[in-house]
Image (cartoon, coloured by chain):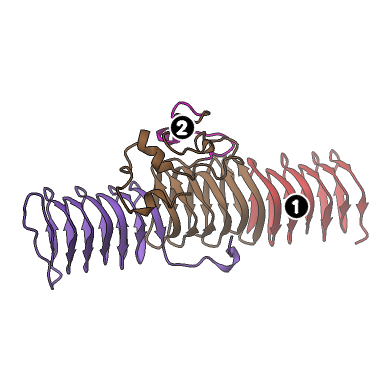
Chain colours: A purple, B red, C brown
Amino acid sequence: MAQAKTSAARHVPRTSGSRDAGVLGTSVRIRGKISGEGDLQILGTVEGDVVVRGDLTIGETASIESENLEAQAVTIQGEVKGDVNASGPVRLGRTARVHGDLKGSEISIEEGAQFAGRIEADFELPASLGKR
Amino acid sequence: MASTVIGANITIEGEVIADEDVVVQGTVRGKLSAKDGVTVESGAVVEADVSGGPMTFAGQVTGNVTSTDRVELQSGARVVGNVKAARITIADGAHFKGNVDMDV
Amino acid sequence: MASSETTIIGRDTRIRARVTGASDVEVQGHLEGELTVSGEVRVTETATIAADIRARRIVVRGAVRGDLNADEAILLEEGAKVVGDVRAPRVAIAPGGLVKGYVETGHAGEGKSHVGRIAHATATCAAPAPVRHAPPAPKSAPAKAHPPAKAHANSKSAGKGGRLSLAGGKAPPPVVPVLKKGTKAALTKRR
């Protein structure tokens, strides 16, 4: 269930139970935590954590300021300040502007994206490179 | 042919150990040892002990040279150091200063 | 400009050295030490590198333990395994490119090659006019972080500290200033 307080008292679509995508439109501004069961696409402005069970898409027009973004697959085309914790892949598109740490099953960044933060993929270096 | 090529504009300061041919066109300072051939081309500078198989020098080598095969100094080569090799050829126009030990 | 000769460190070659120069370098074997060139560095699938790499452009498909800094771009392709920081105006990570470290786009890597090429991209952040002095650096600029030292040996670890916080004062757009709370990446993770 999506729960959020909007400064403009807008009603946010619920995404309970099914994987229907919820969409927060371009003009939506939310301050508060967003959580949901399904997929979520954010095109507007959010100040607060976003935790969804499905996939999270942050569109080019979106601007997110958060401590934690959690989802399965995360696709970012817009602006994000905050750490991303995905159980699936994290993809930054060319127009993404992200400042925060990324965690996911796979991280990809398109050339042209702006990014600053840590990436901790799960792998080991070959033995010949040992410990520094 | 698989080989390591150290290009003309590159400087390596340290140790090179190769299980393949090495062609030096740039600069190597330190140590160079190859399982196979070593070629020091004209214009190259090697300030290192060199060990390996067959060697061809057309550039500058300063250091002791140990070859399991033959060492060839071509015209224009400048070699300063002791050479230990089964065979050695010093062409007309090559400069060489050092001892030669063919008792390998 | 890169020389037409590409230096190739073959698959069966091990180098423990400082490698510098003005050309492209392709590493297929093992390199331990330092690699600083003004051309392009290609790290192939078979390469294992324990060194910081500085170049105009770096394309990685192999394993690297070290920091990557480029004047133009860094591409981590499928097969890349990098433990270290990655900094360049443009950074791309393909699916299958793996990294553990701090990654930052929008700024040229510190420590250009000793040949001293200054890519135009560096002007955005690394060196606005006052190159040599520590500029009226807003925050913590350890002095050596700023002048993009042409002596690559000195600049080996320059530029690691606090670039983003400095950028708050004079920076190009890329990232918005420091978060209000908690996002550790912004402040504490940078060395």
Mark nearer the viewer, 1 or 2:
2
Q: Nearer the viewer, residue B2 or C31?
A: C31
- Side of B84 where C158 appears, left or right: left
Q: x%, y% of residue C97?
A: 42, 60
Element type at mark 2: loop
Q: Quadrant of the N terminus of chain A?
A: bottom left
Kindly identify which residue carries mark 2.
C127
Q: x%, y% of residue A80?
A: 27, 51
Q: Nearer the viewer, residue C37 or C106?
A: C106
Q: x%, y% of residue C13?
A: 65, 59
Magenta segment, principal secondary structure? loop
Q: x%, y% of residue C131?
A: 50, 29
- Side of C139 where C1 appears, left or right: right
- Quick check: is C129 in the magenta stretch? yes
Dot 2 amino acid type: Ala
Measured in 3D between alpha carbons, the distance from the residue under mark 1 to the one under mark 2, in whole angstroms, is 38 Å
Picture layout, residue C165 above or below residue B86 = above
Q: Any mark on residue B31, and which?
A: 1
Q: Residue at x 73, y 61 (%)?
A: B35
Q: Quadrant of the C terminus of chain A?
A: bottom right
Q: Disc 1 sits on a residue from what chain?
A: B
Query: Would you say residue C89 is visible in this rendering?
Result: no
Please report the bounds of the magenta region as a residue range. Answer: C111-131
- Quick check: is C133 in the magenta stretch? no
- Side of C75 where B10 appears, left or right: right
Dot 1 amino acid type: Lys
